[in-house]
Image: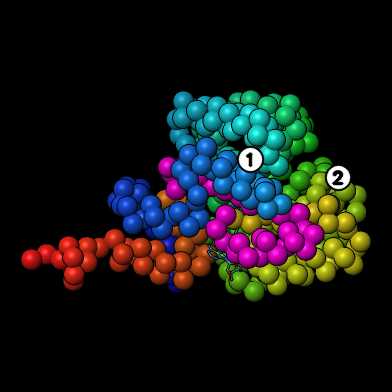
Amino acid sequence: MMRAVLLRMSRSRFLERQVTRRRFARRAVRRFMPAESLDGALEAGLKLQRRGMGVVLTLLGENVSDGAEAEAVACHYVLALDRIAALAMDGEISVKPSQLGLDLGPAEARRYLDPIIAEADHLRIMVWLDMEDASYVDRTLELARYARERTSRIGVCLQACLHRTPEDLAGLMESRTRVRLVKGAYRESANRSMQRKAEVDERFRELARRMLADGHYTAAANPVFGTHDDRLIERIRDVAGQHHVPSAHYEFHLLYGIRADLQEWLTANGAHVSVLISYGEKWFPWYMRRLAERPANVWFALKHLARSQPSMTGVGAPP
Ligand SMILES: Cc1cc2nc3c(=O)[nH]c(=O)nc-3n(C[C@H](O)[C@H](O)[C@H](O)COP(=O)(O)OP(=O)(O)OC[C@H]3O[C@@H](n4cnc5c(N)ncnc54)[C@H](O)[C@@H]3O)c2cc1C
């Protein structure tokens, strides 16, 4: 119920305007986002790299409906790739197709993706395509196919919750395209998506098993499991062991600020771990999805709100 409300709120432009200017909200967001600037994100990335982890950078923003804005996003990502290379970071980028103008049409999105994949291919850096709500899946997979014909340094996110995902995964495995499997962060109807968490977890396990059981696929396309679910991660590691998949042939990606203990533990225990760092000013819908994933986060945000209220006692209390 709370999840549904938060996901509905994430789409409200009115709330976005109200919330993003509040100082308490900006402070609460810091838990999941080290900085709004690329420089700040790179600095946080370097710290993680010193602890043995890779980094995936993502500029927040979605549903861009203006070509000039999509072009600016593309220029930004080319700059981010250059900065990753200049710092010799173990870094990658992850892009939302709707931020590259997918709503304007497939040709526009391809046009803005082109300079990104050209630079990434040149610098040997991976580009990931995020998966947005179910209405974007066909168009995102089409964009991934287009990019895959031009470079192997492209991967796409699939959401375990969607009924269609086993079939989509089969197609991507066939073309040896890299996949980042996640549970799915959007609210979807029952005809498109499983509604029960236990079912989604089971489906995630099954899809992970399919990828790990195919040695040719793991060797060519290092699958990525994007989750903080420690029981699921343990299961994936077991299955990888059963199929003799070396730890260099699959990866775990986790979000900045979530289960840092697990990130450290996995790294110390030989797993290939990368941390996805989000940055930018357009954090509202993304932040609301993080709250929806774990409603306890709402209390954390409210604590910041309470702290930001003027004290009613002691120094500074109104007369
Ligand atoms: C690298 C990465 C990329 C992603 N990309 C996409 C994408 O492109 N499209 C998409 O739809 N979704 C994406 N997601 C989000 C994903 O779909 C899930 O919504 C999210 O990962 C929560 O599910 P979980 O697998 O961590 O498992 P859950 O069962 O939800 O959580 C397991 C445990 O992780 C911790 N946890 C999980 N979420 C939070 C949180 N927000 N705050 C605090 N603790 C938390 C809790 O301890 C929880 O018990 C991505 C996730 C990751 C890690």
The type of residue carrying mark 2 is: Ala
Towards the viewer: 107 or 250? 250
Mark 1 Cα-neighbour bin, 10 Å: few <14, some 14–19, many ≥20: many
Which mark, residue 220? 2
SS at badge 2: helix
**Disc nearer the start of the sequence (1/2):** 1
**In the image, residue 23 lies at what x, y percent?**
32, 52
Mark 2 Cα-neighbour bin, 10 Å: few <14, some 14–19, many ≥20: some
The residue identified by callout 1 is 93
**In the image, residue 238 lies at what x, y percent?**
83, 69
Towards the viewer: 4 or 260? 260
The magenta span reads 256-283
Examine the structure image and report whether residue 257 is included in the region drawn in magenta: yes
Marks 1 and 2 in Cβ contact (< 8 Å)? no
Q: Is residue 78 left or right of residue 20?
A: right
The quadrant in which residue 128 appears is top right
Question: Is residue 148 something one can see in this rendering?
Answer: no
| Quarter of the N terminus within the rendering | bottom left
Q: Residue at x 83, y 52 (%)?
A: 248
Judge: label 1 CB < 8 Å from ligand 1. Answer: no
